[in-house]
Image (spheres, rainbow, N blue to C red):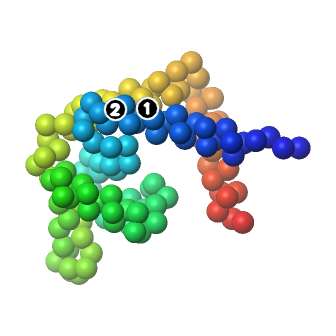
Amino acid sequence: MHYQLGKEITSLSNQIKRHMGMLAAKTGIGGSQGRILHYIIAHQNEDVFQRQIEEEFNLRPASASGILKLLEQNGYIIRVPMKSDARIKKIVLGKSIASRQELLIQDIFDFEDQLVEGMSQNEIQTLLSLLEKVSHNIVKK
């Protein structure tokens, strides 16, 4: 039996990207950049490295590097070499993000709430679990 799950997920992904684009018009920070900045903000009391971002967002190293380079050029982040190994760079928030940080966080939280509106906690957990299984099924083949 064919479910067209790929088509539905692609359609949902496109809707999310369009919505994130509208949010970007308000904050001036694009969708992927906004999600990565949100992650860095949420983990700002920890050491954050490019590798974590690659894993968290399922990005290839070149894609993550390109996004981080743009964020650095705009002053949103700074990559600080580690004393133990200068090739490894810790990612910290730059000064340019300070004025937009709260708006960015609130927009993402509001959008997450919108995505699960009308769902119970159990339904949300089930959805997350099923999406994780779908992702795992793609990786294992």
15 in relation to 94, above or below: above
Outermost residue toward the left?
95
**Amino acid type of disc 1?**
His
Quadrant where the C terminus sits is: bottom right
Instruction: Count how many numbered circles sit on residues in the image.
Output: 2
Residue 52 placed where, x, y %? 39, 62
| Residue 58 visible in the picture | yes
Residue drawn at (69%, 46%) of the image: 6
Report the Cα–Cα distance between label 1 and label 2. 6 Å
Residue 135 placed where, x, y %? 63, 53
Q: Is residue 61 left or right of residue 100?
A: right
Quadrant where the N terminus sits is: top right
Residue 93 placed where, x, y %? 19, 52
Residue drawn at (17%, 44%) of the image: 97
| Residue 38 visible in the picture | no
Q: Is residue 60 left or right of residue 66?
A: right
Secondary structure beneath label 2: helix
> Image quarter for residue 107?
top left
**Label 2: few (<14), some (14–19) or many (≥20) C-alpha neighbours in 10 Å:** many
To which residue does mark 1 refer?
19
Residue drawn at (52%, 34%) of the image: 15
43 in relation to 11, above or below: below
Marks 1 and 2 close (CB-CB < 8 Å): yes
To which residue does mark 2 refer?
23
The mark found on residue 4 in the picture is none
